[in-house]
Image: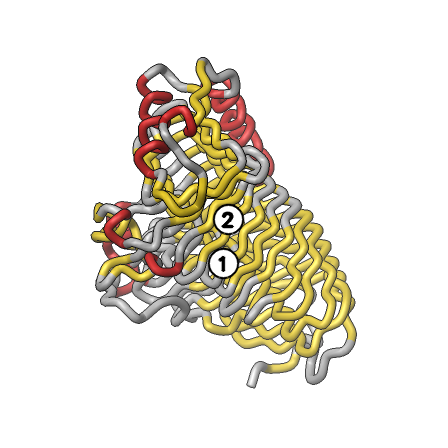
Amino acid sequence: MLRRVIFPALIVSIGLFVAGAAKPKSSFDVRDFGAAGNGTEKDTSAFQKALDACAVSGGGEVVVPAGKYLIGSIQMGNRTILRLEKNSILTGSPDLADYPIMDIRWEGRWQQGHRALIYAGNVDHTGIIGPGRIEGNRAVAFGKGLRGAPVLEPISCNDLRWEDFSVTHDGTWATHPTYCANVVIRNLHIRNTRDGIDVDSCKNVRIEGCDIDTGDDAISLKSGRGMNGARIGIPTENVLITRCVLGGGWFACIGIGSETSGGIRNVRIEKTRFTHSGTQAIYIKTRTGRAGVIENITGEDLDVANGGFLKINATSGGNQSTPDDTVEGDLGYPIIRSIRFSNVRLKDVTTLVDAIKIAPEKPICGLTLTDITGTCKKGIILSNIRDAVLRGIRVTGFSGPLLAIENTTGSGIRGAVPLK
């Protein structure tokens, strides 16, 4: 069922993009608009003139030849592809004044912040193609009381394509598609001290062949926080993550949350290698008062090393550093259901599964773990789970029980010890 949900949407996404922008009408070279490409003079104006000329003429490609281009924030238009040729480097300006203040989404809320280095808003058939590189600047990652500037941030865009380039940043999220539909992110190389890709209330997203190593979440799926996010109610849905290599630092390689109030659904993770993580390869994190439904999360054919495999925290996960307008009462308990992982190979994993911070008022309905092999230091701990299915769990190297449970029902749990 999950495949039928995801893949038609992704096929439509790619088809629309090709029809809309694969055959550009015109080509615009940034040097023809005055870009120096010497790494010292600011080329912001030249880039913006080229991008605007492309959009106003009906679309095409803005070409960036080899060189190092120092730019502040630029804005992309309709039917515009930014093509970064070999040995082209875009470097973000260190001057915060080069990043205008606007309404942005940050930690699940709309608020004032600095515009991204490359921004697009309410446009269709747009994207960036490599093999060049884009470098954010740590000096603008912190905005003097406002959110600083990420590298890439499209908002409310349709048919978005990023392919075959590198991104580096330090201090805030690297890329942040928000309220976008029909998104293809392919063969990106991302290095950052914070998150790599933050998918925020987007639908029909394909992340393929990416190499991401970060100090925080490599990929994070979000949909708003608290009553504000629940009231708007725009989920992240129909996401395929395939053939990636992921390393995460403080939290996870793939974080689902913690801003999940609009819902996260229909996510498939496949053929992906998790090289290391600060805590977990996959971390589903939310908290009481966030509300939202997290459902149909599937993983298959995964290699996991050096960190935990799966953690679920539905009661106290996520950021508490900013005020949170909670959803009160029974409605505020997040709902988690239909979580399935199979054909997972572990190497020196710390904990196989940690799923104990689940409210008894809203137990997880449907947690399936099948054909999991390899080595781990600790086994599986489950609390407040309904309809669990455990089959083909063949792991070694752990101390203590393989399975400890509390208030859990299902198959394959015979012989489990009580959770202490």
Mark 2 vs mark 1, CA separation in Å: 8 Å
Residue on which the image places disc 2: 167
Task: Relative to 419, say whether 18 is above or below.
Answer: above
- The foreground one among 28 and 239 is 28
Q: Are marks 2 and 1 in contact (CB under 8 Å)?
A: yes
- The foreground one among 374 and 307 is 307
At x 46%, y 68%, the residue is 313
Q: Position of residue 173 (x, y in %)?
A: 41, 55
Amino acid type of the residue that numbered disc 2 sits on in the rendered structure: Val
At x 38%, y 37%, the residue is 180
Residue on which the image places disc 1: 192
Q: Secondary structure at mark 1?
A: strand
Visible residue check, residue 332 = yes
Visible residue check, residue 161 = no
- Count residues near mark 2 (Cα–Cα under 10 Å), then give few for <14, some for 14-19, many for 20+: many
The number of numbered badges drawn on the structure is: 2
- The foreground one among 237 and 70 is 70
Quadrant location of the C terminus?
A: bottom right
Task: Relative to 285, say whether 81 is above or below.
Answer: above
- Count residues near mark 1 (Cα–Cα under 10 Å), then give few for <14, some for 14-19, many for 20+: many
At x 63%, y 43%, the residue is 209
The numbered disc on residue 309 is: none
Quadrant location of the N terminus?
A: top right
Q: Position of residue 230 (x, y in %)?
A: 28, 52
Q: Position of residue 278 (x, y in %)?
A: 55, 70
Q: Name the quadrant containing residue 90.
A: top left
